Image: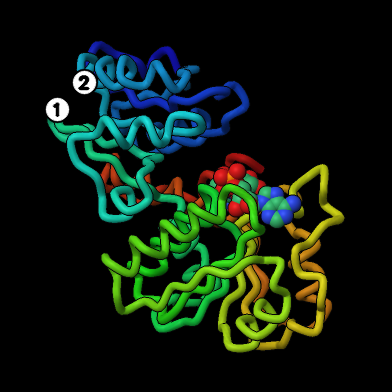
């Protein structure tokens, strides 16, 4: 590693808090070495109120880019020179590219979700979707799928503070992507949920339900909603197969897709934005094994 860092080496980083557990430095540094790119990647613990200073440093140090994690995603979006369409609608960024001093913010979580589905032979174009949740992951999915021409998205969320966020997303999408029919319902309305899933091609859990240590939990309690042609997806990647996915698979759903691929593909999208190159995914998987 020491031999790789020279006077010309460009810096990229992850900012957020905490970041010590992140696998991003390992992944990006492997890829830069693999492609012989003169870049290095670090992680910096940055709190929300430190975001403007961190972005100034990014400009000052002419850093090529930053990945942004919680709790900095919204503050970063508010301090960009330009936003991608998805980042603008969501009001949050997870990837910043420094284009010769102009900081351009992107949100690649939704791109990662769509990329993972493509990797499993599923195109969201024209699909009817039910998405559970209205937090960061669910909103990114809803916005990207609408931009990528899903026919309809029915959002279900418990009657908690996130429900207003769902309504806000639906209103923005109605204005920005009118061809996609976006509706919001309370998750407590189980009859409506059943009715909407019966009409849907794709069901997505975009909440943390089923994530460790609550792996014995699924928001879908009526297993009669599962049918062979219903594609069932989860954003949760720990465990790799959630209770939702296991029960869907056992009930005969032929395509069940976990969150691990979404995580990988959002990184692939960010790598392309930074370098213009395709991330060496297979080589990185081999290196990790
Ligand atoms: P968040 O806190 O922003 O949103 C949480 C959402 O879950 C809200 O809609 C909330 O209403 C809902 N929720 C929480 N507990 C619930 C419960 N018991 N019953 C029903 N709904 C409940 O969280 P987030 O950042 O969107 O993350 C959600 C999940 O997505 C986490 O498990 C996270 O690890 C995962 N995630 C995965 C990826 C990926 O690339 N695969 C990316 C981002 C997040």
Identity of the residue drawn at 66% across and 58% down: 158
Location of residue 186 in the rendering, given as x and y in whole percent from the top left corner: 63, 66
Disc 2 residue lies near ligand 1 with CB under 8 A: no
Q: How crowded is mark 2: few (under 14 residues within 10 Å), some or many (20 or more)?
A: some
Residue 172, quarter of picture: bottom left
Q: In this view, does 231 lie to the left or right of 86?
A: right
Ligand 1 within 8 Å, label 1 CB: no
Residue placed under numbered mark 2 in the picture: 59
Q: In this view, does 33 lie above or below 240?
A: above
What is the secondary structure assignment of the residue under circle 1? loop
Which percent across, then down, holds residue 127? Answer: 46, 82
Q: Which of marks 1 and 2 is nearer the N terminus?
A: 2
Question: Is residue 142 toward the left or the right of residue 245 in the image?
Answer: left
User: If the image is split into quadrants, where does the N terminus sit?
Assistant: top left
Instruction: Identify the residue at horizontal 51%, vertical 63% (top origin).
Output: 116
Instruction: Name the spot of residue 187 as percent of width and height, x first.
Output: 67, 66
Q: Position of residue 80 (x, y in %)?
A: 24, 34
Q: In this view, does 237 lie above or below 223?
A: above
Query: Badge 1 is on which residue?
Result: 101
Residue plotted at (41% across, 83% down): 126
Q: In this view, does 79 lie to the left or right of 152?
A: left
Question: Toward the viewer: 104 or 50?
Answer: 50
Q: Residues within 10 Å of mark 1 (few under 14, many from 20)?
A: some
User: Is residue 23 depicted above or below 141 in this figure?
Assistant: above
Q: Is mark 2 on a helix, strand or loop?
A: helix
């Amino acid at each position: 590693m020491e031999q790789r860092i020279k006077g010309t080496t460009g810096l990229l980083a992850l900012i957020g808090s905490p970041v010590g557990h992140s696998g991003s430095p390992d992944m990006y540094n492997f890829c830069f070495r693999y492609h012989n790119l003169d870049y290095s990647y670090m992680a910096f613990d940055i709190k929300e109120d430190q975001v403007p200073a961190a972005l100034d440093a990014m400009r000052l140090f002419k850093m090529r880019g930053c990945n942004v994690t919680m709790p900095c995603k919204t503050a970063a979006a508010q301090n960009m020179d330009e936003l991608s369409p998805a980042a603008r609608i969501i009001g949050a960024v997870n990837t910043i590219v420094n284009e010769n001093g102009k900081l351009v913010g992107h949100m690649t979580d939704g791109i990662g979700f769509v990329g993972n589905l493509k990797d499993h032979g599923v195109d969201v174009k024209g699909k009817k979707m039910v998405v559970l949740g209205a937090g960061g992951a669910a909103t990114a999915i809803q916005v990207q799928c609408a931009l990528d021409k899903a026919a309809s998205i029915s959002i279900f969320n418990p009657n908690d503070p996130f429900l207003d966020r769902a309504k806000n997303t639906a209103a923005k999408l109605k204005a920005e992507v009118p061809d996609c029919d976006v509706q919001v319902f309370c998750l407590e309305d189980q009859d409506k949920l059943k009715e909407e899933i019966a009409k849907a091609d794709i069901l997505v859990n975009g909440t943390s339900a089923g994530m460790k240590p609550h792996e014995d939990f699924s928001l879908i309690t009526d297993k009669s909603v599962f049918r062979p042609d219903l594609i069932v997806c989860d954003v949760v990647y720990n465990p790799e197969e959630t209770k939702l996915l296991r029960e869907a698979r056992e009930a005969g759903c032929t395509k069940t897709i976990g969150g691990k691929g979404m995580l990988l593909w959002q990184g692939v999208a960010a790598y392309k934005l930074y370098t213009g190159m395709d991330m060496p995914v297979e080589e990185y998987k081999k290196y990790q094994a």
